[in-house]
Amino acid sequence: MNGFKSLDPRHNRQKQRTDTMKANQPTQTTGYRVWWATFAYDKMRRVSAGESKTKRHEGRKMRIALVGLLIAVGLCSGCSTMKQTAFNGSSEKSETVIRVSATADCVPTGIKVNAGDVLHFDSKEQKWSAGGALLTGTDGLEGTPSKEELPVAVEGGKFAELAGSVGSWKFLIGSANTITMIRSGELCLFMNDRVRCYGDNSGAVEVIITRARQK
């Protein structure tokens, strides 16, 4: 029976197709496996590329954040430097300009001082008027107030002389002077005049204040 060959041509053709399919089956299977391996590799490569792109994107964001942090640190350092060179809280020389009206018995400067601080005042070539008199400099009018003209803001000083105060401590300044603070608090400036008699004064002067040393 094994050597039997059908005389029917259709049977023989069907058998040949079956034998051919069996012979080609390993090749087809191998091709399918190769295709699947190629597809899987390509998929993994795309995923890896996507991960790399994501990592690059995350790395870029981290670099941007780092640059922002460095800038912020730089700005903060700049702010600290500015604070150190500002008038209040500075250990270095710094200056500010204060406008002092002749009609005010106390002009707050906003400058906080401590006992032991050394301040230099300069108001040269500045003029104002006390009691309707001619314009005069911040060294004040000639002579000292008479007994009838007392009390004055700072005894022993001249009319129209620049003066200052820290709390209850009052002192004379004039047109240029360097003074060591003996009290702590806010610095105020004013014209030396009779107490409660500032209404008839006129003008204003600008005073340059330099902190030469801070306690």
Image (cartoon, rainbow, N blue to C red):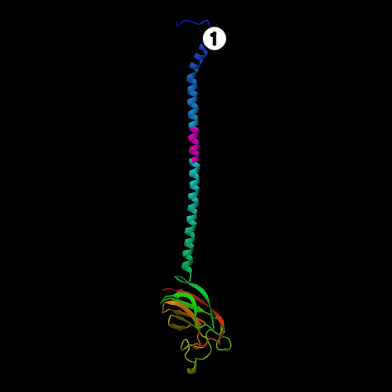
Q: Residue at 50%, 18% (x, y): give it.
A: 24
Say above or below: 200 vs 10: below
Task: State the extent of the magenta-drawn residues as a range.
Answer: 41-50
Picture coordinates of residue 104, whole percent (x, y)? 52, 82
Visible in this render: residue 118? yes
Residue 204: in magenta span:
no
Give the side of residue 167 with respect to residue 13, left or right. Answer: left
Label 1: which residue? Answer: 10
Indicate the position of residue 181 as horizontal and vertical percent values.
43, 78
Q: Residue at x 47, y 61 (%)?
A: 76
The C terminus lies in which quarter of the figure? bottom left
Overall secondary structure of the magenta stretch? helix
Name the one closer to the observer, 91 or 35. 35
102 vs 155, nearest the viewer: 102
Percent across and percent down for residue 188 are: 48, 79
Secondary element under disc 1, as helix, strand or loop, is helix
Instruction: Tell me the residue at 45%/77% (across/down).
Output: 186
